[in-house]
Image (cartoon, rainbow, N blue to C red):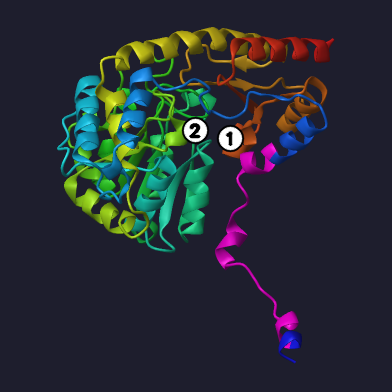
Amino acid sequence: MENTRMEKNVFEPAQRLQHVQEYYFSRKLKEVARLNAEGCDIISLAIGSPDMPPSANTIDVLCREARRPEAHGYQPTVGTPELRQAMAAFYARWYGVELDPATEIQPLIGSKEGILHVTLALVNPGERVLVPNPGYPTYTSLSQLLGAEVVNYDLTEANGWQPDFDQLEELVSNPATAPKLLWCNYPHMPTGARAQRRTYERLVDFARRHGIVVVNDNPYSFILNEGERLSILQVPGAKDCCIEFNSMSKSFNMPGWRVGMLCTNAEFIRWILKVKSNIDSGTFRPMQLAAAEALTGSTDEWHMQANIATYATRRAIAEDIMRELGCTFDPTQTGMFLWGRIPDDIDNVETLTERILHEARVFVTPGFIFGSNGNRYIRISLCAKDDKMQQALQRIREMKD
């Protein structure tokens, strides 16, 4: 009798899952794995996962510290003093931004974690958040999972992929439905648009006038980005109303390490720490000390320059691929991707990307996954060796013939 009752039970997922789908790359990589199992040998130019190692010094510190018997216990959620001090030194050296390592920096287990913690700390269910279109899909999906209402603001090629501030003013015109949070990301992913000081100044002014917290996600400022590196925290008063993420995944070739940082005022840090301290128990101490070495060690600048040289060579091949496909692109874009507009005679971006996948056996990203303003674009990752990118170019040439 008991078994009969159990068989009739119907289990349902939480209602929040109705608002999100499995992450595109999670789904698509299953298909790529199946094609590879069938012998297709797919070349992936889709995901931005650096294929190079961190500096040798970084790895040496990790190995040395991991051998210490006392290194394996729980760590403070706030991070080790060594890592916080290294992060503060990094911001002072490269951005000219002074941060108190004890109160104005929070190490993260990657930026995705930070998106979760900031939303939980600042946004109530039903409140609105402003998300760029196109933009990083996790801004939308995590907001929806947490019950926030996502309101898109447009980024367009005609406007250099910068915010339209007239539109932003319209979106906050009703105080009863004013958003709590605005997500931005410069240098921009997926479009490669460069950070602009004027944009940061206008965002800080917008935040102060409307009581909105602006979160700038800034992991790409060292990838093919010549000249001054910009941070929204360089703007006077920004620390009072803005949060900035940075990451070691891209610039330091450490995506699997999951080491990021959140920089803002001490009060915001305290709120976010209330969330974070109830979710995780800190990062492995040897990883934190190795990350500190990567940020401040004797080889850090050399290593970043080596990355730039590597990505520059790959970028030239990616541009050839774009031209071969008849796509147009802005040659001034930065970061570890190349964003291009598909030809007008192609009806749908997925028509092109699926043909490339199944005929040329090359996986590139359709722009629609970043929002409707990406519907006519593709994105090529530079995270593949030169020979693989050259092979991808040759396969696409053969497909076109």
Q: Is the magenta stretch mostly helix, strand or loop?
A: helix
Residue shown at the point (44%, 63%) measured from the top left:
126
User: For the residue labelled by badge 2, is the local secondary structure a helix, a strand or a loop?
Assistant: loop
* Residue 373: image tag: 1
Please give left or right for residue 247 compared with residue 156 in the image: left
Compared to residue 307, the image places residue 37 above or below, namely below
For the N terminus, the image quarter is bottom right
Compared to residue 274, the image places residue 182 above or below, namely above
Give the percent coordinates (x, y) of residue 32.
73, 34
Give the percent coordinates (x, y) of residue 5.
72, 87
Please give left or right for residue 352 compared with residue 220 in the image: right
Mark 1: amino acid: Asn
Compared to residue 368, the image places residue 149 above or below, namely below
Mark 1 to mark 2: distance in Å?
7 Å
Is there any visible trace of residue 173 in the rendered image? Answer: no
Q: Earlier in the sequence, mark 1 or mark 2?
A: 2
Residue holding disc 2: 155
Residue shown at the point (32%, 29%) measured from the top left:
64
Q: Which span is picked out in magenta?
A: 5-29
Q: How crowded is mark 2: few (under 14 residues within 10 Å), some or many (20 or more)?
A: some
User: For the residue labelled by badge 1, is the local secondary structure a helix, a strand or a loop?
Assistant: helix
* Residue 3: image tag: none
Say which quarter of the image contains residue 238.
top left
Compared to residue 264, the image places residue 340 above or below, namely above
Q: Are circles 1 and 2 on residues that touch, CB within 8 Å?
A: yes
Q: How many marks?
A: 2
Residue shown at the point (48%, 17%) measured from the top left:
333
